[in-house]
Image: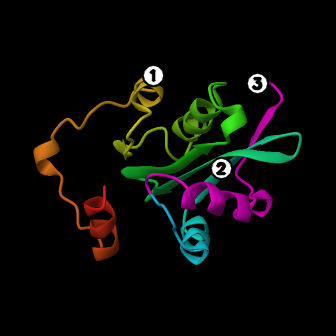
Amino acid sequence: MSDIELSDDKARLDVTRIHGWLAGSYWSPGIARARVERAIAHSHCLGAYRGGEQIGFARLISDRATFAWLADVWVAEGARGTGVGRRLVAWFLEHPDYRDLRRIGLTTRDAHGVYAALGFRPLARADYYMERISPELARLYAAR
């Protein structure tokens, strides 16, 4: 793990690779590259690198005062199970701009254990939360 470097320098991000990862993910299948580029432009992004090659990605959207949303945490297939994803998330949780936020949210279908180990838990007041989803996302959900 000591051979893994984390960097929030957006110039280092391999956007082609990130787009490929996200377009093949369960949460954003087929996402357009332009949408990924816009998301990166308006988020605090973090890359994980081994030998100069990007092997992980995560981004955080925040007002840097009260809340943040963790999104698009991805680790390349060959690096999974080595703690890279946990390191990406922990980096944000320890960052001075985010460590004192009142709430950091995320969604996951299959990584509950990773996030629970970092202090995440099911919604304390799920009945307070609502969402508005696009027709595109509604169609995606209906197709599953």
Amino acid type at image mark 3: Met
Residue topped by disc 1: 117
Left/right of residue 132 with respect to residue 56 in the rendered view:
left
Looking at the rendering, which quadrant does residue 107 occupy?
Answer: top left
Image location of residue 144, percent across then percent down: 31, 55
Looking at the image, the residue that sits furthest to the front is 143
Amino acid type at image mark 1: Ala
Residue at (57, 68) in percent of width and height: 36
Image location of residue 137, percent across then percent down: 33, 67
Front-most of residues 31 and 5:
31
Tell me: residue 33, above or below residue 17. Answer: below
Instruction: Name the element at disc 3.
Output: loop
Which residues fall within the magenta stretch? Answer: 1-27
Separation of marks 3 and 1 at Cα, in angstroms: 18 Å
Crowd around label 3: few <14 · some 14–19 · many ≥20 (10 Å): few
Looking at the image, the residue that sits furthest to the right is 51
Residue topped by disc 2: 46
